[in-house]
């Protein structure tokens, strides 16, 4: 024997399913080309900035080692 839903419960299910279907339809119809174009433009900008950095004259660049002395403490243990 097949059980039938109560009318109020059935209405809630119908409204829920219709809402999900409507949301799916809206999401599938959205045009993301502007977001995609903006993303591609940012990638091109980064690439241009990187190429500008590569073209710089790096001959005067020197590596200098920085050594910091550890501050000596008069304490004999960590807790004192």
Image (tube, rainbow, N blue to C red):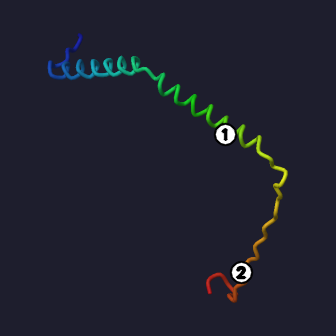
Contact, CB < 8 Å: mark 2 with mark 1?
no
Task: Please name whichever residue, 9 or 65, is drawn nearer the observer in this view of the structure.
Answer: 65
Q: Could you tell me which residue is drawn at 62 percent across and 87 percent down?
A: 80
Instruction: Name the residue at the bottom extreme.
Output: 74
Q: Secondary structure at mark 1?
A: helix
* Residue 62 relative to residue 16: left or right: right
Q: Could you tell me which residue is drawn at 67 percent across and 35 percent down?
A: 48
Image quadrant where residue 53 sits? top right
* Residue 1 relative to residue 70: left or right: left
Using the image, determine if residue 72 lies above or below residue 64. Answer: below
Using the image, determine if residue 71 lies above or below residue 13. Answer: below
Q: Which mark is residue 71?
A: 2
Crowding at label 2, few (<14), some or many (≥20) Cα neighbours within 10 Å? few
Q: Position of residue 42 (x, y in %)?
A: 57, 34
| Circle 1 residue | 49
Task: Please name whichever residue, 4 or 13, is drawn nearer the observer in this view of the structure.
Answer: 13
Q: Could you tell me which residue is drawn at 52 percent across and 30 percent down?
A: 38
Q: Nearer the viewer, mark 2 or mark 1?
A: 1
Q: CA distance from mark 2 to mark 1?
A: 41 Å
* Residue 63 relative to residue 72: left or right: right
Q: Which mark is residue 4?
A: none
């Amino acid at each position: 024997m097949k059980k039938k839903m109560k009318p109020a419960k059935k209405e809630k299910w119908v409204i829920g399913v219709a809402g999900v279907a409507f949301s799916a339809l809206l999401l599938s119809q959205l045009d993301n080309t502007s977001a995609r174009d903006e993303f591609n433009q940012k990638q091109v900008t980064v690439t241009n900035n990187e190429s500008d950095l590569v073209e710089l004259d790096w001959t005067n660049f020197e590596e200098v080692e920085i050594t910091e002395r550890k501050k000596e403490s008069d304490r004999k243990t960590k807790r004192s």
